[in-house]
């Protein structure tokens, strides 16, 4: 049987299949089933900075019944489904999961500017989280804020959180940086133990009949993996932080591709939400079968085989690839 063991954020995992932050982690029973199906670790659904701040104000219940007392952005927070797991329940959830599961539990904090909520990382550590994933889901719309300011905000958050806690910290980012490789390196230097590539930005849709903008969340397709493969292949060995691929990992073939690009682990949400918990054991069995059929004794032998470091041909990942792709189209 091939050896699937891998290291991620200093944790030794039995295989590279991690459950991504999603509602899959709301129930202990679901996670127990995922663990039995072979999941090697779980990232919990996020706790939002806004939730922490509201909880600290101590007015959560008041705002639920008096939503108009809040500005529109915060009204949504007070009503959001996640609030059934307010900041305190989130801590209790970690504590309970640590008792019920053998696999590592990675807490997820979702925030941006401001530091009032960052000390909460220490409380999550205290509740038993094995690591922390920091998700910066941030869309800057003010024209006077420039890229440098945004990048500075990301780096300050990583530095700040690293000072707060001893458990490893991964940062989940979007691909929308002008100089992605430079930013990845800066996050690495700021102390991030892992980079999670990439956040999916959910684009709201337009309802033309009612003339309003509606939130929409579609599950991913494997086509989304390619962006992650490219950047993982570019960054592998150029940074010390481990890379987790999230977005479009649906099958064992997607896992093999991600590891060949240089990922330490993959994180899956859509495929499990769509196909059910048992899909994880299918992916794991298929992964083992693939490695056996291709004479690999371990996934470590596979890691980075198609990375820029190993193929040494940046052209296939950069601009020349674009030119070739356009030329290769035959009508
Ligand atoms: C319903 C749903 C809820 C999610 N909630 C979170 C969340 O709370 N925090 C987070 O960082 N990512 C969240 N995600 C993003 C996933 O963790 C994952 O990164 C993304 O869906 C891409 O992986 P996939 O292609 O396997 O779905 C959510 C995704 C879905 C589909």
Image: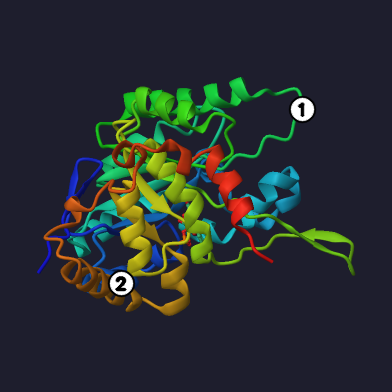
Q: Is the residue 67 above or below the residue 166 in the image?
A: below
**Horizontal side, residue 160 vs residue 50: left or right:** left
* Residue at 62% in and 63% down: 217
**Horizontal side, residue 37 vs residue 273: left or right:** left
Residue 268 found in image quarter:
bottom left
Mark 1: is the Cβ under 8 angstroms from ligand 1? no
The residue tagged 1 is 143
Quarter of the image with the N terminus in it: bottom left
- Rate crowding at label 2 as few (under 14), some (14 to 19) or many (20 or more) other CA atoms within 10 Å: many
Q: Secondary structure at mark 1?
A: loop
* Disc number for residue 26: none
The residue tagged 2 is 283
Q: Position of residue 302 (x, y in %)?
A: 23, 53
Q: Secondary structure at mark 2?
A: helix
Colour scheme used in the picture? rainbow
Q: Is the residue 140 above or below the residue 210 in the image?
A: above
């Amino acid at each position: 049987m091939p050896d699937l063991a891998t290291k991620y954020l200093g944790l030794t995992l039995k295989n590279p299949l991690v459950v991504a932050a999603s509602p899959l982690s709301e129930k202990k029973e679901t996670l127990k089933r995922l663990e039995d199906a072979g999941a090697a670790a779980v990232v919990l659904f996020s706790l939002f900075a806004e939730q922490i701040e509201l909880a600290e104000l101590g007015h959560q219940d008041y705002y639920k019944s008096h939503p108009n007392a809040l500005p529109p952005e915060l009204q949504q927070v007070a009503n959001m489904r996640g609030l059934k797991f307010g900041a305190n329940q989130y801590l209790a959830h970690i504590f309970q999961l640590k008792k019920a599961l053998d696999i590592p539990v990675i807490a997820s904090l979702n925030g941006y500017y401001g530091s009032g909520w960052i000390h909460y990382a220490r409380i999550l550590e205290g509740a038993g989280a094995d690591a922390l994933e920091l998700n910066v889901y941030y869309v800057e719309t003010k024209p006077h804020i420039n890229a440098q300011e945004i990048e500075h905000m990301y780096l300050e958050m990583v530095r700040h959180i690293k000072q707060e806690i001893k458990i490893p910290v991964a940062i989940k980012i979007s691909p929308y940086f002008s100089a992605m490789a430079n930013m990845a390196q800066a996050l690495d230097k700021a102390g991030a133990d892992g980079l999670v590539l990439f956040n999916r930005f959910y684009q709201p849709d337009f309802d033309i009949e009612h003339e309003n903008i509606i939130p929409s969340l579609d599950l991913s397709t494997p086509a989304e993996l390619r962006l992650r493969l490219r950047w993982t292949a570019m960054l592998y060995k150029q940074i010390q932080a481990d890379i987790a691929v999230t977005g479009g990992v649906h099958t064992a073939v997607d896992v093999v591709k991600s590891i060949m690009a240089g990922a330490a682990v993959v994180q899956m949400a859509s495929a499990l939400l769509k196909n059910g918990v048992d899909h994880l054991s299918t992916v794991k069995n298929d992964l083992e079968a693939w490695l056996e059929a291709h004479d690999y004794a371990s996934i470590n032998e596979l890691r980075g085989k198609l990375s820029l470091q190993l193929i040494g041909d940046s052209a296939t990942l950069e601009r020349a690839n674009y030119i070739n792709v356009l030329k290769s189209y035959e009508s």
